[in-house]
Image (cartoon, grey):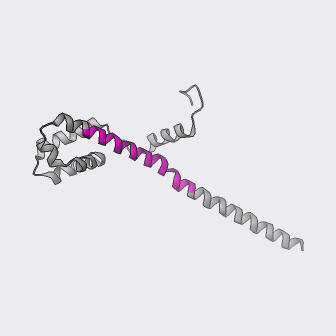
Amino acid sequence: MLTNKFKPTVAELREIYTELVSPTISDWSEGWEQVSKAIGHCGMYQEKAAMESFDEITREVVKRLGFQNICLSENIVADRARFAEIYQAIKKRKRTEVNVGSALPNLWEMVQNRLAELAQKGQKAIEQEKDKT
């Protein structure tokens, strides 16, 4: 609210919340750098060690593309472009999961609390009616 001319929407507030509470998700280029280093250090025959060195999103992208396929590729530019595309899609999906998913536990808790309040008020109303009679 201090940096915008207009009041933020609920969606904008949720996006800011997601930025604050979600773990830092690196850029696709950092993931690609991890892959390049793993190829140099581990080679194509130590796939397990290479996969363990990746962050979660990079690991998922490399599983989709195939570590050995990347190692044996003759068109690394195209592989890098596909890596970037898949990485950004996964990153977006994960951010959406955090953004939308974070509301569900709170919503459930709020509904439960409200139901408990209503039940308590109903019980008090019944007791007051009994006292009157």
Q: Is residue 81 above or below residue 129?
A: above
Location of the N terminus (image quadrant): top right
In-image side of 19 versus 75 (left or right): right
Q: Is residue 50 above or below residue 6?
A: below
In-image side of 103 versus 25 (left or right): right
> What residue lies at 52% left-to-right and 54% top-to-bottom?
104
In-image side of 56 versus 9 (left or right): left
| Residue 86 shown in magenta | yes
Q: Which region is colored magenta?
A: 82-107
Location of residue 70 in the rendering, given as x and y in whole percent from the top left corner: 16, 43
Residue that lies at the very extreme toward the right in this rendered image: 133
Location of residue 113 in the rendering, given as x and y in whole percent from the top left corner: 63, 59
In-image side of 8 versus 61 (left or right): right
The overriding secondary structure of the stretch rendered in magenta is helix
Location of residue 8 in the rendering, given as x and y in whole percent from the top left corner: 57, 34
> What residue lies at 75% left-to-right and 69% top-to-bottom?
123
| Residue 99 shown in magenta | yes
The mark total stands at: 0
Location of the C terminus (image quadrant): bottom right
> What residue lies at 20% left-to-right and 36% top-to-bottom?
78
Please tell me which residue lies in front, 70 or 2.
Answer: 70
Please tell me which residue lies in front, 82 or 52.
Answer: 82
Occupied quadrant, residue 107: bottom right
Location of residue 60 in the rendering, given as x and y in whole percent from the top left corner: 28, 49
